[in-house]
Image (cartoon, rainbow, N blue to C red):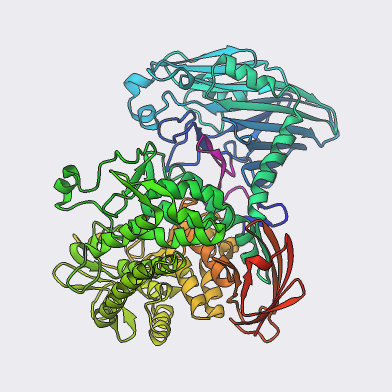
Amino acid sequence: MQYGYFDEKNKEYLITKPNTPAPWANYLGSPEYGAIISGNAGGYSFVKSGANGRHIRYHFNSMDEPGRYIYVRDLEKGDYWSGSWQPVGKDLDQYKSVCHHGTGYTNIVSDYDNIRTESLYYVPLNKTYEVWRLKVRNNGSQARKLVLFGYVEFTNHNNYEQDNVNLQYTLFISRTYYKNNMILQSINENVPEDQCWRFFGAAGAEVTAYDGDRDTFLGDYRSYGNPSSVENGQCANSLNYNTNSCGALQINVELQPGEEKEVVFLLGQYDEEGASEILGQYKDLSVVDKELEELKAYWHSKLNRFQVQTPSDNLNNMINTWNAYQCFITFIWSRAASFQYCGLRNGLGYRDTVQDIQGIIHLDHEMALERLRLMISAQVSIGGGLPLVKFDHNPGHEGTPDDPEYVQETGHPHYRADDALWLFPTVIKYLKESGNWGFTDEVIPYSDHGEDTVYEHLRQALQFSLDRMGVHGMPVGLYADWNDCLRLGAKGESLFVAFQLYMGFNVFMEIAQNKNKPDDVQWAQGLLDELDTNIQKHAWENDQFVRGFTEDNYTVGSWENDEARIWLNPQSWAVLSGAARPDQARLSMDKVYNNLRTEYGTMLCYPPFKEYGMPVARMVLFNASTKENAGIFSQPQGWLILAETMIGNGDRAFEYFLDCSPASMNDKAEIRKLEPYVHGQFVESKDSPYQGRAHVHWLTGTASTVMVSLVEGIMGVQPQFDGLCINPCVPSDWKDFSMVREFRGKKLNIQVENKNGVQKGVSHIILNGKEIQGHLIPAADMEAENTVRVIMG
Ligand code: NOJ
């Protein structure tokens, strides 16, 4: 069933049926002032931290409530509804609504009983409060008297857990006040003054009554769907003293036929003075349209740096807007706050963050650079990464995963075997996009002590693995590799990490070559050859690569096993790293296609673990076909697509894209459940009774892996040190398509012609009328704006 559609031109997703099978969310603002909102206005807001700066409530794992509610009551008829379908939930035969989720804003347009409301929610650019602009219009032929209520439920403590758990304390430290068109809430906590106050105010209309006490507004044994004050058509002018706070503001309006009125509600963590100043800025309500335009311009200008027009609307929507926007949201928010992540994580996961950077490099390499520096400064001097980079990370002074507290817990250090190796694909991508060659010489501290150039940091990342090799000459698995659930320990070996190391050597050599360091190239080449020999000798099984070896030499991911006999990542990474010979690549990728592919994506391994499990294969704890236990983990889908493009298989790469693209499920939303415009962390696979159901929306490494596979793999746009390579790998029925790409300050309008219907292969390029052989456009030949014809076949 379909609940909405993509509006590519406006870069919006429109929800036309509000009873979506899960809350379909959008992100407003930034972690400086963060807000998450569903198509039914459910969600929460916070300043700086979802866990410690929370000022409005959301009940996780529940019914998508409460939220930013606007109620409308007809004074004469006594009927009432809400600007979003929920919480009142009128009969959908009479209540029509379209929710526009856009880039940094959400606008819910609803029609009921000849009254149209438009509830626009956003956080102005670089501001730390939120705006709800309500437009209400009488589309009928009778004059109407309406009462409007803006409602928000404050937390009683900035810390989300305290607010929910420590009730004997937090209920008694908060009060509300009413002043000058706003409810102010104070929290008596020993925190800086600017965190003790919240406000909910109205501009553009006089508040006629209010409630600051939630229980009075809602009434006894009622819900958000039928609050007492709304049903009465009158707030009680209550204030909170020792119960729960809310901000409810009542505004009475009269509307002649065809007449429209506007009111703006404002919410944030400010005291009376700060709040009054903000309210003052909205005396002239036209500021809202200006702010909205600024917001759109900010996001669209980023996204417009790479746009495509292909025969697939699905792909266009993903590359041009939604996958790209999700990459930014995941990059900015990491795993901090969503409807699954409650905000309690106090830092950035190393591997996730370094990969997230990859998803935005082609759109904003300056933004990527700052985060890349941070992550390099979270590399320990022995070369491994800190598994979690705290928000208050202090380079040069951090403890290490060798610290006794960790070792005591598990008997070995908490290093992940893969963390720092993610720097290789990310750093090289940054260098090639930006042309900022000097970055390799930039000196950055280690997390514990000492400092080095970026180049030497990379060498240390290799050294970390080289210092931890197992009996088969491959890197050990330590506490985990990419797979959180795979504990191969200090002696067991990981093939995934072996392939990462393989890629690491290749990247290091490419950089060393460019820096004219032949000794380093030779050093890395020797080690690469050794690793290659070991992989070929120990890890190839007729037609697939294995996943690893345990400390007692059990082969994980062997076709001989009963469970998890074949794994996806070693096959795709063998190709991505360059370790697979051409025949191995073909055989193993075909085996993946025949054994792991489902109509909803490709499983991480199969069959699921049932018997073999702890302590090595911790995924056995998950139900079969769920998450790492043979679920369709979404992040590896990008690697799979990219690997197929590397071996020239455009048809199959595109097939895999369609399998995993959220947009492919737009008309099967009742199966997928999650938003059809963003990737989730995983999809349940074939041994689940709910095959095709997706989970953990928005904040997932999938955004970046799939984005990279689309941009560099299918569209084939790959920056190089000295120019831009264009080498698409597409379905054979794509006869022509176009792209617009900004590259180092130059604009390229690219038209690709594929008359012979090949999947890969560029015969020549015509740059501004001049023919170039091959597929590299030298940066030196580019003008400010360029016309590029790419001839495939
Ligand atoms: C989710 C984690 O955030 C990520 O770091 C990990 O690689 C995947 N799970 C797979 O286990």
In depth, the one of 222 and 307 nearer the eye is 307
Image quadrant of ligand 1 equals bottom left
Q: Quadrant of residue 761?
A: bottom right
Q: Residue at x 45, y 30 (%)?
A: 53
Q: How many marks?
A: 0
Q: Quadrant of residue 768?
A: bottom right
Q: Residue at x 16, y 48 (%)?
A: 407
Residue 101 x %, y %: 63, 47
Give the vertical position of 634 relative to 285 (above or below). Answer: below
Magenta stretch: give its range: 13-40
Q: Residue at x 54, y 47 (%)?
A: 367
Give the vertical position of 223 relative to 449 (above or below). Answer: above
Residue 154 x %, y %: 49, 25
Residue 269 x %, y %: 52, 24
Q: Is residue 679 visible?
A: no
Q: Is residue 507 magenta?
A: no
Q: Is residue 746 left or right of residue 668?
A: right
Give the quarter of the figure containing the N terminus. bottom right
Q: Is residue 573 left or right of residue 123?
A: left
Q: Is residue 327 visible?
A: yes
Give the quarter of the figure containing the C terminus. bottom right
Give the vertical position of 535 relative to 344 (above or below). Answer: below
Q: Is residue 682 left or right of residue 19?
A: left
Q: Is residue 503 left or right of residue 181?
A: left
Residue 629 x %, y %: 32, 64
Q: Quadrant of residue 590?
A: bottom left
